[in-house]
Image (spheres, helix red, strand yellow):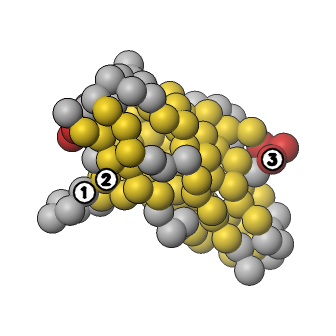
Amino acid sequence: QVQLVESGGDSVQAGGSLRLSCAASGRFSSIYGMGWYRQAPGKQRELVATITSGGITNYADNVKGRFTISRDNAKNTTYLQMSNLKPEDTALYYCNAEITVRRYRADYWGQGTQVTVSS
């Protein structure tokens, strides 16, 4: 069974920084794209950042220049370094990964880690 486990969420003041981690575990063949999404109360889940297996990154406009996504393929882990946090960054942050188990590729999601930014 494949699992994605996030960590690193916390409560910080505006202008602060956090680093989220997401590790994939279980029996699988390959991990392709990985990414971070977030969902604030009363809002739809939105893309934050993605990274391909080759390291190509993509960011939502509202986090460009403040967030950095990276991955360690040897550890099956992706990271989200968040700086200059704003109250509007408050949300439940989810990790996502495209993972192949045997011959089947599917999207997997973590359980979420809470980020709260106070002004």
Furthest toward the left, the residue is 42
Residue 47 visible at all: no
Quadrant assignment, res 55 = top right
Badge 1 or badge 2: first in the primary sequence: 1
Quadrant housing the C terminus: top left
For label 1, the SS is loop
Compare residues 85 and 51 and report the one nearer the observer: 85
Compare residues 77 and 16 and report the one nearer the observer: 16
For label 3, the SS is helix
Badge 2 or badge 3: first in the primary sequence: 3
Residue 64 position within the rendered picture, expressed as x and y whole percent measured from the top left: 35, 25
The amino acid pointed to by label 2 is Ala
Going 75% across and 51% down the picture, which residue do you hit?
76
**Residue 42, above or below 23:** below
Q: Which residue bears the numbered disc 3?
A: 75
Going 48% across and 35% down the picture, which residue do you hit?
18
The amino acid pointed to by label 3 is Lys
Q: CA distance from mark 1 to mark 2?
A: 4 Å
Q: Which residue bears the numbered disc 2?
A: 91
Q: Which residue bears the numbered disc 1?
A: 40
Answer left or right for 38 relative to 36: left
Q: CA distance from mark 2 to mark 3?
A: 26 Å
- Front of the two marks 1 and 3: 1
Compare residues 44 and 10 and report the one nearer the observer: 10
Badge 1 or badge 3: first in the primary sequence: 1
